[in-house]
Image: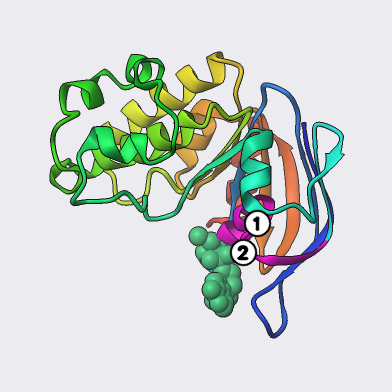
């Protein structure tokens, strides 16, 4: 479904990503682990066309590396960005409708809490609810591939469990997921495979069952 080949990315001087190769298959949930500054967000932005890149990105067999962001979105890629980026002074409903898509009920099925709060200003939601809103907004685009950038950031462990259930529901809908995370227990719950990104390069990859080994090598 997604194939990244020898990808380099830069914000002007020096390459932040250097020779990335990775794949996400249909229906798979793949995690990207790595410390702060490794280039995880840059990788997701590169897939969306928000950073200058060299190398190739294929989506369902089509090369998308030269396409504009909105063209990639219309092919079926959506992102829930780092830091959520919801509109705090708009209602929950309007945060979803700004996507230009109208089918709220499909998304409310996955997030019943958001339906209960649809008239509430998004800035008054709890951190966990704001994260759910950011994911819900991405799902409004009916993506085939959902990019999630550190959804667990700043959330209490009990909320991370809810998040884990939400991600599993989304994968049951058949949506492929590329999940950037530093929370290893969330990754263990939801991912099929894992890549480790360090200093702009993939330094390890494997089945999620190898997470323990990766944790010892890179996170202790
Ligand atoms: N907008 C930007 N302009 C210049 N450098 C950036 C920008 N965003 C990120 N970087 C740099 O790129 C590197 C990777 O950042 P990032 O992709 O945000 O890492 P991560 O998400 O893994 O924490 C860091 O060295 C960071 O300082
Ligand atoms: Mg980041």
Q: Residue at x 37, y 41 (%)?
A: 98
Real-space Cα separation, disc 2 to disc 1, in angstroms: 6 Å
> Could you say where residue 168 lies in the image, as x and y percent from the top left?
48, 21
Q: Disc 1 designates what residue?
A: 43
Mark 2 close to ligand 1, CB under 8 Å: yes
Q: Residue at x 61, y 52 (%)?
A: 44
Q: Disc 2 designates what residue?
A: 39
Q: Quadrant of residue 207?
A: top right
SS category of the residue bearing label 2: loop
SS category of the residue bearing label 1: helix
Mark 1 close to ligand 1, CB under 8 Å: yes
> Could you say where residue 55 lies in the image, as x and y percent from the top left?
85, 60
Q: Quadrant of residue 166?
A: top left
CB contact under 8 Å: marks 2 and 1: yes
Residue nearer the viewer, 11 or 181: 11
Residue nearer the viewer, 206 or 45: 45
The magenta segment is 38-54
Q: Is residue 42 magenta?
A: yes
Q: Quadrant of residue 158?
A: top left
Residue 104 visible, this angle: yes
Decide if residue 10 is on the left or right side of residue 171. Answer: right
């Amino acid at each position: 479904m997604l194939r990244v080949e020898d990808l380099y990315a830069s914000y002007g001087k020096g390459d932040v990503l250097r020779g990335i190769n990775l794949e996400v298959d249909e229906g798979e949930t793949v995690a990207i682990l790595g410390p702060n500054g490794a280039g995880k967000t840059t990788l997701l932005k590169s897939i969306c066309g928000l950073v200058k890149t060299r190398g190739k990105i294929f989506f369902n067999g089509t090369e998308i590396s030269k396409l504009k962001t909105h063209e990639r979105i219309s092919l079926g890629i959506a992102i829930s960005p780092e830091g959520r980026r919801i509109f705090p002074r708009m209602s929950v409903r309007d945060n979803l409708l700004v996507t230009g898509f109208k089918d709220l009920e499909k998304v409310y099925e996955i997030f019943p809490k958001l339906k209960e709060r649809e008239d509430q200003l998004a800035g008054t939601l709890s951190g966990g609810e704001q994260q759910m809103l950011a994911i819900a907004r991405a799902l409004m685009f009916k993506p085939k591939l959902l990019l999630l950038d550190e959804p667990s950031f700043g959330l209490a462990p009990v909320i991370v469990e809810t998040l884990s259930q939400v991600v599993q529901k989304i994968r049951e809908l058949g949506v492929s997921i590329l999940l950037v995370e530093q929370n290893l227990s969330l990754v263990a719950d939801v991912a099929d495979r894992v890549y480790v990104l360090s200093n702009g390069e993939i330094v390890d990859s494997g089945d999620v069952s190898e997470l323990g080994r990766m944790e010892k090598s890179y996170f202790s």
